[in-house]
Amino acid sequence: MDTAKYVARVVSLRAAGPSASAPDESDLLLAGPGYRIVTLEVSQDVRTGDASLRVDAVSDFHALKNSIALELNELWGEQPPWGMQGLRLRIDRGEDIPQPWFTAAVLTDVLDVWRLDGTGGWIALGVADRDTTDEVSIVVVVTDRDPV
């Protein structure tokens, strides 16, 4: 897992903006007006039922995400992490949480979030590991919608 490669991908996502996804973008997870969510890396074979494989993958992916975040902090300034528990509580109460923040709250526990100066946009980075029946992945949210 190459941190420099992932940092370069996130920087390119920032430069392209939230609505620039192409139909052939293989890492696209979800997109809509003013946002897109892409995957940087996806685990392999953690759905086999072997819990230790999943624990190892989760640990490795959090370490990789933290490494990427450190590099992005150098570029864009360090920001406190954003916990998703509050959004999930609001979802459970029936509040309408707009995309991409709804999906980010469902997939991740914590996001590193950067406000993009001069663009009005946001970049968020997290580990999608909440669904224990699915692979673990690192996701990037690119949006022009303020966090809720």
Image (cartoon, rainbow, N blue to C red):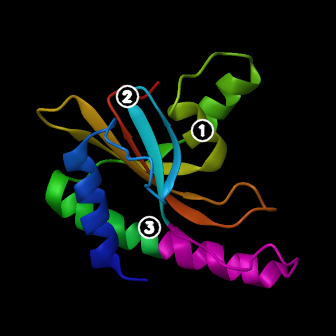
- Image marks 2 and 3: residues in contact by CB distance under 8 Å: no
Report the mark closest to the observer, 2 or 3: 2
Pair 1/2: label in front: 2
Q: Report the front residue among 36 and 129.
A: 36
Q: Earlier in the sequence, mark 1 or mark 3?
A: 3
State how many labels appear: 3
Residue 24 to residue 47: above or below: above
Residue indicated by mark 1: 103
For disc 3, the marked residue is 65
The image position of residue 33, as x and y in percent, is: 42, 26
Q: Is 29 one of the magenta-colored residues? A: no
Horizontal placement of 89 versus 34: left or right? right
Quadrant of residue 73 in the image? Answer: bottom left
Residue assigned mark 2: 34
User: What element does badge 2 sit on?
Assistant: loop
Question: Disc 1 on helix, strand or loop?
Answer: helix
Instruction: Locate residue 8: give its quadrant.
Output: bottom left
Q: Who's the residue at 75% across and 55% down the image?
A: 131
Dot 3: what SS? Answer: helix
